[in-house]
Image (cartoon, coloured by chain):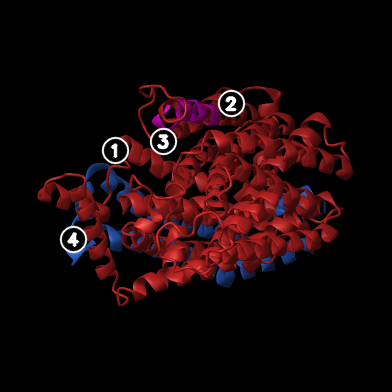
Amino acid sequence: MRRLALAAALLAPLPALAHPIAAGQQQATNWPAILMFAGFVALTLFITRWAARRTRTAADFYTAGGRVTGFQNGLAIAGDYMSAASFLGISAQIYADGYDGLIYSIGFLVGWPIILFLMAERLRNLGRYTFADVASFRFAQGPVRAFAAISTLLVVLFYLIAQMVGAGQLIKLLFGLPYGYAVGIVGLLMTLYVLFGGMTATTWVQIVKAALLLGGASFIAIAVLAQFHFSPEALFAKAIEVKTAAAAAKGLSPSEAALAGHAVMGPGGFIKDPVSAISLGLALMFGTAGLPHILMRFFTVPDARAARTSVLWATGWIGYFYLLTFVIGFGAIVLVGTNPGFLDATGALRGGSNMAAIHLGQAVGGNLFLGFISAVAFATILAVVAGLTLSGASAVSHDLYASVFAKGEADSARELKVSRITVLVLAVVAIGLGILFEKQNVAFMVSLAFALAASGNFPVLILSLFWRGCTTAGVVAGGLVGVLLALVLTILSPAIWVSVLGHAAPIFPFGSPAIFSMPAAFLTIWIVSSLDRGARAAVDRAGYDAQRVRSETGLGAAQANAH
Amino acid sequence: MTDEQRLEAIARDPRYQSLVQRRGRYAALLSAVMLATYFGFVLMIAFDKPLLAKPVYGAISLGIPVGFGLILLAILLTGLYVRRANRDWDPAMAVLLAEHAA
């Protein structure tokens, strides 16, 4: 705060509401934006305090006591999903490459119907706090929960990195703080939310933020379209013109430049080869169904019907939001990419490549709206980070500590304590990784988390729900093979091996590992389960019929209240 | 009746079996539609990018209606499933469970 006050004092003579388009004037301090921002953080902290009073038991902490309605949960899921990756990352991707960004949006969305048709109600009927409750329902608790905890932590970490990078760049841009400090502040705030408010706080912060983000994004999209007399065609035509001019300025011949300009309207260089395209497609579609912080939301509603309703609301809001981000991305090409005030000396976006939507907010709405949209984007990140951290923490405390180490003997208070310690550890790790991955596109980082989820949690859940022959040994072996293979291939891929670790050429040439790791997981589960002749395997298979009836009817489903 | 016996009785009930079967078939059908359209789109990206980039109306390329169509289809399919579940299956399941509770 001292630093901010100092910066503010130095810059005070500048008119706070300078013309938004003027070059270089929103450097460092922007009072309306900062006030808006502070107001937002205060509001979310207030929600957290309110929620903290209602958080007494483990059930309150993990699942808001199961009192969330379908509509509320739908908004909260949409909130989880409209993360930094979706809002900042996809709009930035569209700003850079045009149509390519839409490939992410579609992939992120089409997983939802699949979740509804195959999993949502069954998850609610079988589970209580974490997806591992479902994955381990008829299996030996210890090994399956240990796997679930490992894979949850890996997915959560990758997802966290993306959010930290987005938040760090945002704060750096807005307040002129060094990136490292910015990431640290995010880590601190998210720790506060999760520690004190638990699931009730993260859910309500998520709902409030989802509503504001939908409102803000709608405003930007409408403002952009209004400049083109509500003709998307005119917007796209102008975007092609801008990209063509940019290509020509780089010294391309007119025909080459025209080609480069038209590339924004179709899939381009972002997916280079067929294998990467299919692999990314698999990861995005099935990853959703394996994201622990998303699956966790199905335990916050009272019954299967509410779980179902929440998917419908979520899909509707998320779909609408992605239509908006498409317009926002193209709006940024036209209104941000042509305005030197938003660009640095080399023609790149000031504040980093992920800031296209934020600059566009200022271009169409001035400083006040810049403040609003920055605050919303920041709250978005905080809320998502909090939800992620919470699911990581519950994996450690509920799955690893309470079920594996304490063998179900742990009391609610001890479990909560373990959970809170995990939150602190996760925050520190996330801050470190956030600094390491500063330059990555956040939508891309999230797609890696999706690949891990699609390769570990998804095959395990599907086969444990639908295949009688599945056994403890099978799911543990297959799940670990999937998630670890995905992790290793990701590290060897261009994004990490070359961009982060600085090697000259990647060992694994494709953009996403899912096309290899996901089938590997299914195959391993199938082979190991089929060969499994142990006594435990007989128990596992014998448990299938009862599990099936419970999953279909909701008979004996946990009420998610503390007993 | 213990919980286990009740589960077994339900599993043997032909009405339960037919309900689960109908529901499963509908879910499988809708999943197949989503998978086929989405992976059709992915394969177009993988093997024929110029097709999606082809202009269909002024500057608007084929990829735009296809992409937006997929988003709307996802919402539509979700809606279809929820309507069917709320209207047909939930009441039928409730009747069944009530009988087996007695």
Q: Are marks 3 and 1 on the same chain?
A: yes
Q: Are marks 2 and 1 on the same chain?
A: yes
Q: Image point 57% across, 36% down: which residue?
A: A435
The chain painted red is: A
Q: Nearer the viewer, mark 2 or mark 3?
A: 3
Q: Considering the numbered disc 3 on the image, is that residue within a helix, a strand or a loop?
A: loop
Residue located beneath label 4 in the image: B55
Q: Considering the numbered disc 2 on the image, is that residue within a helix, a strand or a loop?
A: helix
- Identify the subunit bearing mark 1: A
Spot occupied by residue A241 in the image (x, y as percentages of width and height): 21, 60
Give the distance between the C-alpha atoms of the residues marked 1 and 4, in whole angstroms. Answer: 22 Å
Residue A485 is a magenta residue: yes
Spot occupied by residue A56 in the image (x, y as percentages of width and height): 86, 54
Determine whether label 3 and label 1 are within 8 Å by CB: no
Spot occupied by residue A380 in the image (x, y as percentages of width and height): 59, 57
Residue located beneath label 1 in the image: A272
Spot occupied by residue A363 in the image (x, y as percentages of width and height): 42, 66
Whether residue A64 is situated above or below residue A289 in the rendered picture: below
